[in-house]
Amino acid sequence: MDPAVEEYFRINMITTKGVDIPKPAMNLDDVEWPTRITNALKRQNFTKPTCIQAMSWPVAIAGRDLVGIAQTGSGKTLAYMLPAFMHIDKLHYNKRGRYEGPTVLVLAPTRELAQQIQAVCQEFDYHRSVCIFGGSPKGPQIRECKYSRPAVVIATPGRLIDLIECNILSVSDVSYLVLDEADRMLDMGFEPQIRNILSKITNQDRQTLMWSATWPKEVRALAEDFLKTYVQINIGALQLTANHNITQIIDVCEELDKMPKLMQLLSEIKQESAQNKTIIFAETKRKVDDVTKQLRSRGLITMCIHGDKSQQERDYVLRQFRDGHSTTLVATDVAARGLDVDDVKYVVNYDYPNNSEDYVHRIGRTGRRDRRGTAYTFFTRANAKQASDLVDVLREAGQQINPKLQAMIPMGRNSGPQRRRYGNPMGRGYHGGGGGFGGGGHRGGRQNGFHHSNGGGYGPTKPSYNNGNGNGGGFGGPRRFEPYARN
């Protein structure tokens, strides 16, 4: 291997599996792009490919099947869409000839992700694409499929099957297939639909690219069934990992303390900058509505998104959030899946999810495109079963581990099926008087804040500790905050 390539692999923790793997395109001009693509990249001030792009472009352009394992926010959409455009060009796509259906099919787990993929396509204005998904009337999507003769179809599995079974759309001639966020599609129960769709693609020359943030056995089985002599590219470790650009802070607290803590945290975030975008995750639709209502009642401009919202409402909320008209968004996991907003600075897990995979995907809404981000998580006794996995994620990312979280591990192993709603047996906070991310340390008593500090603190890369004597203190603005202190 070329020494420069070997060093690139080492620095970026890249591993590969397969035969005759092409050399990575570490620079944009390592690929002979069509002029229209080159011009579009220049308009977007695109200068250097991400790791997954550098590794994937030569493989995909060569017509090879591919499995890409990389965290969210790694730039995978361009990793497969630019080669897709070139694939269409090579087939001499003829819009005036008889239309047999799309050449490129991209499957995505949610309508939000599907729409964002199409937005990327439209930025290049290269080949006609349509986006089809559930939750919206079929009529406009049917008309677009019939009359626009798209080269690219981006779809969620359920709605695509509806249109196939109604003979509105044929996928038999698809020769470039993308399964985006394959692990999430399987988690959401789409495996039967995926297998159904793939069985209808009869083109023997089909090229398949599968993308996933994790590599569980279910995804491996899908790859073995449908990919031919594929190249596997892993960016980072294969086990569950979080983006290392994200500072993760865990507050072991009581259920009833969450809202006061959240209010104080948001106050600190807005004091840092009124433009800071924050996504707050709650576990249920009802909780999303409740948190949103409480924040609004306290004067915070807040919007929310979940599965019961109409497509029109969801589009409006996402547009307002993306454009910065509203900087606080409360969401469920599924609703925010695939939400691609580069400048989200903070994620708050108001409720901890049911598994650590969802935790990693949630916090991946920040720290995108090599930016720094911060994720705060309220962790209660009811979440004790997840403590061990969460500690593993934190340790792998080089994060400081709250001793109270560590102490919950044996409790989770012995808790059985019962889930208790309230209580934190390990004390009330990280500081002397208790209270979350440094609450109470310098004021005494039972505080729930993220107070500015004069000492101690947690710098951007290296944490330090405070003994709880009052000189430290919680969040402390953009540069100085403590995840916990020694008691």
Image (cartoon, rainbow, N blue to C red):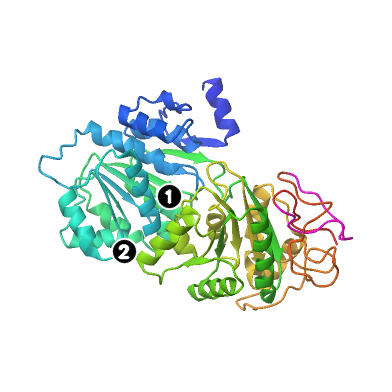
> Is 468 inside the magenta-drawn segment?
yes
Looking at the image, can residue 413 be seen? no
Tell me the magenta residue range: 462-477
Q: Is residue 290 above or below residue 363?
A: below
For the C terminus, which image quadrant? Answer: bottom right
Residue 296 or 368: which is nearer the viewer?
296
Residue 134 is marked as: 2
Disc 2 packing (10 Å; few <14; some 14–19; many ≥20) = some
The percent coordinates of residue 48 (x first, y second) are 49, 31
| Label at residue 143 | none
Q: Position of residue 365 (x, y in %)?
A: 53, 53
Residue 58 place in picture, x, y as percent: 39, 30
Q: Is residue 486 rendered to the left or right of residue 419? A: right
Question: Residue 175, percent across and down?
Answer: 25, 42
> In this image, 268 relative to 131: left or right?
right
Q: Is residue 132 magenta?
A: no
From the image, tell me which residue sits under label 1: 220
